[in-house]
């Protein structure tokens, strides 16, 4: 499973920079960047804070998807 997010799109919709959002939720800009790129999975608390800062529900901002790995056939 992998966590996908729509932070960048909704941040842009509100004309917020990564720094603006980071300040609203009390983290560093690099944390927002890492979450947007899928390199860091936020805690539940941080996910709720980000969603709240963007005026959204967590399940509208984040979604789980399953990675499908195909086995090579000999």
Image (tube, rainbow, N blue to C red):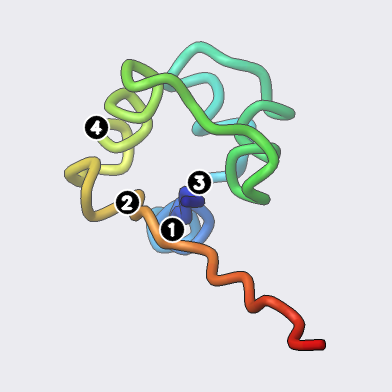
Which one is closest to the eye, mark 4 or mark 3?
4
Q: Nearer the viewer, mark 3 or mark 1?
A: 1
Label 4 with label 1: CB-CB less than 8 Å: no
Q: Mark 1 near mark 2, Cβ–Cβ under 8 Å?
A: yes
- The residue depicted at 37 percent of the width and 32 percent of the height is 50
Q: Which-is-in-front pick, marks 4 and 2?
A: 2
Quadrant, the C terminus: bottom right
Q: CA distance from mark 1 to mark 2?
A: 5 Å
Across and down, in percent, residue 18 comes to 62, 39
Element assignment for label 2: helix
Considering the numbered disc 4 on the image, is that residue within a helix, a strand or a loop? helix
> In this view, which residue lies farthest toward the top?
26
Q: Secondary structure at mark 1?
A: loop
Residue found at the far right of this picture: 74
On the image, numbered disc 1 is attached to which residue? 6
Residue assigned mark 2:
61
Residue named by callout 3? 16
Q: CA distance from mark 4 to mark 2?
A: 10 Å
Question: How far apart are the two marked residues, 4 and 3, measured between alpha carbons?
Answer: 14 Å
Q: Neighbour class for label 2 at 10 Å: few (<14), some, many (≥20)?
A: many
Q: Decide which of 62, 21 is in the foreground and name it.
A: 62
Q: Earlier in the sequence, mark 1 or mark 2?
A: 1
**Mark 3 → mark 1, Cα distance in angstroms:** 14 Å
- In this figure, which residue is indicated by the disc labeled 4? 52
Among the two numbered marks 3 and 2 on one chain, the one whose residue lies closer to the N terminus? 3
Disc 4 + disc 3, Cβ < 8 Å: no
**Which residue is at the front of the view, 52 or 61?**
61
């Amino acid at each position: 499973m992998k966590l996908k997010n729509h932070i960048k799109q909704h941040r842009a919709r509100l004309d917020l920079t990564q720094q603006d959002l980071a300040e609203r939720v009390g983290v560093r800009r690099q944390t927002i960047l890492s979450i947007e790129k899928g390199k860091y999975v936020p805690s539940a608390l941080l996910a709720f804070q980000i969603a709240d800062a963007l005026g959204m529900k967590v399940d509208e901002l984040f979604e789980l998807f399953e990675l499908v790995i195909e086995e090579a056939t000999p």
